Amino acid sequence: MNSVKPNSYRSGPDERGHFGIFGGRFVAETLMPLILDLEKAYTEAKADPAFQSEMNGYLKNYVGRPSPLYFAERLTEHLGGAKIYLKREELNHTGSHKVNNVLGQIMLARRMGKKRIIAETGAGQHGVATATLCARFGLDCVVYMGAVDVERQQPNVIRMEMLGAKVIPVQSGTRTLKDAMNEALRDWVTNVHDTFYCIGTVAGPHPYPTLVRDFQSIIGNETKAQMQEIEGRLPDSLVACIGGGSNAMGLFHPFLDDSTVEIFGVEAAGHGLTQLHAASIAGGRPGVLHGNRTYLLMDADGQIQDAHSISAGLDYPGIGPEHSWLHEIGRVNYLSATDDEALAAFQLLSKLEGIIPALEPAHAIAKVMELAPKRAKDHLMVVNLSGRGDKDVPQVGDILRGKSK
Amino acid sequence: MTTRIDTRFAELKKAGRAAFVTFVMAGDPDPATSLEIIKALPKAGADVIELGMPFTDPMADGPSIQAAGLRALKVGMTLKKTLDLVRGFRKDDNATPIVLMGYYNPIYIYGVDKFLGDAKAAGIDGLIIVDLPPEEDDELCLPAMKAGLNFIRLATPTTDDKRLPAVLANTSGFVYYVAITGITGAAAADASSVSEAVTRIKRHTKLPVCVGFGIRTPENARAIASHANGAVVGTALIDALRNSLDADGRATGKTVNAVAELTAALAQGVKGAQQAAE
């Protein structure tokens, strides 16, 4: 399938929310009218200049955009190949790229008159961003978080509570991100009249993968302009980590039709691809979960399998449907990095650049460590530094102390 | 093409009473006990059996049905074994309609065409797939109709008059009205709003309308059955089953009876409704 290359990689999805065979609207009937309403509201908002201009104001003065495109001189020297630039999404208010999308969705929710916001979160970055904007706009906020993640991401749980959100630890299933998403969907199906579900990644039923991508595309659009200004040309390659894949899609999408730009997504290989991991493309196949068809980790009977990653934000057995499509048509190369590789990258970036990355983008840095030395010195490589590592300091500290003992 | 579902509802119409539809999870708490349970259901007064297909991520289900699915998966239940269970049931009962209910992924992975062929051959009459709205009819609904299986759609309180025709377009067998916005086993259904909704749906279709979600007691069942063509009970039966298990979640000598006794009591409630209505 898909042997014919499309004229543009940026025209999807179709009107039913499909990217090739991926995407769609696999939801319970109760939710169907809601996602049709959301699609209508989003189409109207996109066409409304007042919506865009209000959002731009908040992006500049509240989020702190544009985020810098920073030349990582010492990392570049150390690896001895490509010239490495970091897109500093970790400098955004709330410490990650998640706020770009949440701002857009919260503004949509306000337009739709919804007063109660629910969200799922893995690492807590999306939960913190949601709690932050709910505080800013005076909305009720409930965040579902797997009980395992509540344990390993305590700093973010405390932040969400300080911001006035109610954090509900999810005890069902594997007690991680996928179960948090199940529980958020159960809440939504119960509280349909006043509740807006703020999904944190480019997954879920149409139109979520599209609207999250659009709100995150500011990352790639800024990068394009900044690189033009600094180097006078396009970058040669892009690297980003992928759980659901929103930071990656935000960076990649504006470049999909620039055929000279090589694009690498990095999944979490956990303990290794032959053991427990979270690399849906490397180790999964197409299936249907959480409202969309996409690559999923599952057994022979179609039961969803446990994912594992050191990084709570990548610990999900699926991936956004547009990534599945970009994989199948071959526009993006999907790689994976193990827990150990990510830990090494976490330490390297901290020591060489004075930037402590979140464990999620540490997976991207890990692959930069492999890719950059094989590239020429005039090769321009951009890596999305999607979040800061403050939330991971206790966890990584425990691991490193445990290892040194 | 007439299915066992069509035949059963025609018989009930003639008898002037509503259907009692029971939901249990295939393979809960183990395949052998599960077969005994579904064999006992018609004897205890069930008119239609909905059989849950276990799935790891049942997004529309409450804690009771989630746990039932996990119990079944833990003892190795698969979609193939669910079909085996129905084959076992059909050895003694060729009249009681069986509807499989669950989520799409296990069927998609089994292969739609192969599944439909195997399901029909096993004696399955209809499908209720929670995460396949009419917008995704090409996936399974249309192939199922072609294969001679009823595709039973859920209508909900959020399905307004504008949307109802789309929801009913490719529905056959019966319409399942989900009486509450929410997950299975949550709130109790309120008989007067149910009556209004059933009347509204019946303006758009000649199919029988069964009502489920939130029906737990013979009294609930009687109240709902006097306004609808059928009452569906799931969580209450699964709770009775769970309460009969030993500390390790295994079946005991009481398990089959616990489900059968509650089924009999609920069936009395449904049958009482017909007398109340006459």
Image (cartoon, rainbow, N blue to C red):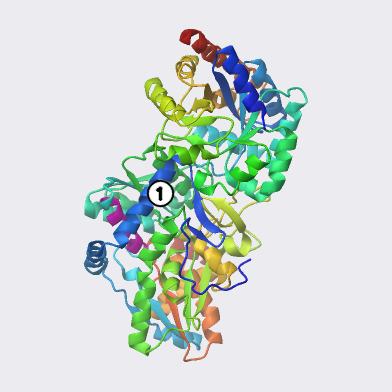
Q: Which residue is mark 1?
A: A35
> Dividing the picture into quarters, in which one does residue A325 lie?
bottom right
The magenta segment: A98-110
> Dividing the picture into quarters, in which one does residue A20 lie?
bottom right
Percent position (x, y) of residue A137? 22, 53
Chain of the residue where label 1 is placed in the rendered structure? A
Whether B73 is among the magenta residues is: no
Whether residue B47 appears in this view of the structure is no
Residue in front for this viewpoint, A166 or B230 = B230
> Dividing the picture into quarters, in which one does residue B31 lie?
top right
Percent position (x, y) of residue B159? 42, 37
- Identified at 67% across, 16% down, the residue is B43
B187 to the left or right of A130: right
Percent position (x, y) of residue A119? 38, 50
Whether residue A347 appears in this view of the structure is yes
Whether A107 is among the magenta residues is: yes
Q: Main secondary structure of the magenta part?
A: helix
